[in-house]
C-alpha cells in the first residue's frame, strides 16, 4: 500500500502541471488568431482612388482625374452652395487635396470642390493636365521701314491750322512730277500741271535731297512727293483749300 501511494503523488502533480500549461496557452492562441485576421483585412478602393469617405493615406495632390459624367464645381463641400462651373464628361481636373467627406478639392480648370465618386483615372495616368496658357503675345504690328535709302529724315513743319494747306504749282512750265519717295530717281506715279492746286500733308512733311532740293509731301490730287524747288520756288504761298 505504501508503494502505491508513493507513486500516486507524482502522477497527480504531473496532471495538475499539464492542465495549467494548457490553460495558459489557450488564451494566447485565441488572441493571435484574432489579431492576424484583423491585419489581413484590406480596404478595396474604387476607381476614383477613394473608399467611401475615407481619406487616402498617400497624397494625390496635383494628380490628374477625369469626370465620369457632366459634374458641377462648388465653392464648398456641399451641393447646397451655388455651383461655379460645369465639368464636361472626360474633362480632366487637377486634385488639390486628398479628399474628405466624399469631396475632393481641385485646382484646375478652376479652384473648387467636386464629389470624389464622380471622378475616374485619366487615360494618360496621374500626370496633371497641361495648364500652360496659350501664347497670347500680340503679333508684331510695327510697320515696315519705309524710309528711302540714302536720304535724310523728313522734317516736320508743324501742325497747320484750319484748311490753309493748299498751294498752287507755279513752276516749272512743264509742271511737277509726283513721286513715291523724295528723290528725283524715284518712280513717277502722277503729275501736276502749272496752275493746278495741291494739298499738303498735315502735319507738313518736307525733306532735302543730296542736291539741296526741297521735297514736300502732298495728299491730293495724288499721294506722294513733289519738288518745291530750292526752296519753295515751284509753289505759291499757302492758302485755304476750296
Image (cartoon, rainbow, N blue to C red):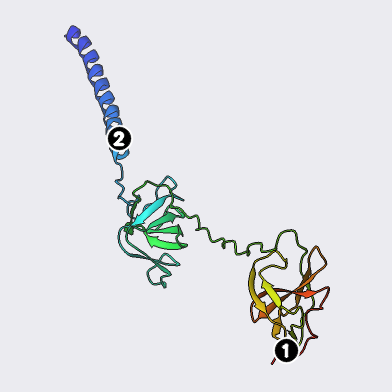
Image location of residue 133, percent across then percent down: 50, 58
Identify the residue shown where x is 72% and y is 80%: 202
Badge 2 is on which residue?
Answer: 36
Q: Secondary structure at mark 2?
A: helix
Quarter in which the N terminus is drawn: top left
The reply to whether residue 102 is in sight is: no
The residue lying toward the viewer, choosing from 12 and 207, is 207
Q: Is residue 39 above or below residue 116?
A: above
Image location of residue 150, percent across then percent down: 75, 58
Q: How many marks?
A: 2
> Is there CB contact under 8 Å for labels 2 and 1?
no
The reply to whether residue 242 is in sight is: yes
Identify the residue shown where x is 28% and y is 25%: 20
Q: Is residue 152 above or below residue 223?
A: above
Q: Secondary structure at mark 1?
A: loop
Badge 1 is on which residue?
Answer: 163
Which quarter of the figure has residue 217?
A: bottom right
Q: Does label 2 or label 1 sit earlier along the sequence?
A: 2
Identify the residue shown where x is 76% and y is 69%: 154
- Horizontal arrangement in the rendering, residue 9 relative to residue 225 (left or right): left
- Horizontal arrangement in the rendering, residue 199 relative to residue 56 (left or right): right
Give the spatial CA distance, label 2 vs label 1. Answer: 103 Å
Amino acid at each position: 500500500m505504501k508503494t502505491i501511494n508513493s507513486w500516486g503523488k507524482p502522477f497527480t502533480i504531473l496532471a495538475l502541471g499539464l492542465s495549467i500549461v494548457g490553460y495558459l496557452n489557450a488564451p494566447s492562441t485565441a488572441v493571435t488568431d484574432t489579431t492576424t485576421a484583423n491585419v489581413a483585412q484590406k480596404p478595396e478602393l474604387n476607381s476614383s482612388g477613394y473608399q467611401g469617405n475615407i481619406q487616402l493615406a498617400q497624397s494625390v495632390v496635383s494628380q490628374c482625374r477625369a469626370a465620369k459624367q457632366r459634374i458641377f464645381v462648388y465653392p464648398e463641400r456641399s451641393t447646397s452652395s451655388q455651383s461655379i462651373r460645369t465639368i464636361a464628361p472626360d474633362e480632366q481636373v487637377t486634385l488639390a487635396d486628398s479628399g474628405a467627406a466624399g469631396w475632393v478639392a481641385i485646382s484646375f480648370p478652376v479652384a473648387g470642390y467636386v464629389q470624389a465618386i464622380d471622378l475616374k483615372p485619366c487615360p494618360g495616368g496621374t500626370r496633371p493636365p497641361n495648364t500652360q496658357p496659350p501664347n497670347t503675345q500680340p503679333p508684331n504690328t510695327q510697320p515696315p521701314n519705309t524710309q528711302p535709302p540714302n536720304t535724310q529724315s523728313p522734317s516736320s513743319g508743324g501742325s497747320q491750322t484750319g484748311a490753309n494747306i493748299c498751294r498752287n504749282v507755279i513752276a516749272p512750265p512743264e509742271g511737277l512730277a509726283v513721286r513715291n519717295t523724295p528723290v528725283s530717281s524715284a518712280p513717277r506715279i502722277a503729275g501736276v500741271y502749272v496752275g493746278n492746286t495741291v494739298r499738303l500733308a498735315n502735319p507738313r512733311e518736307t525733306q532735302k535731297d543730296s542736291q539741296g532740293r526741297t521735297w514736300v509731301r502732298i495728299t491730293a490730287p495724288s499721294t506722294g512727293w513733289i519738288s518745291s524747288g530750292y526752296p519753295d520756288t515751284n509753289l505759291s504761298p499757302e492758302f485755304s483749300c476750296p
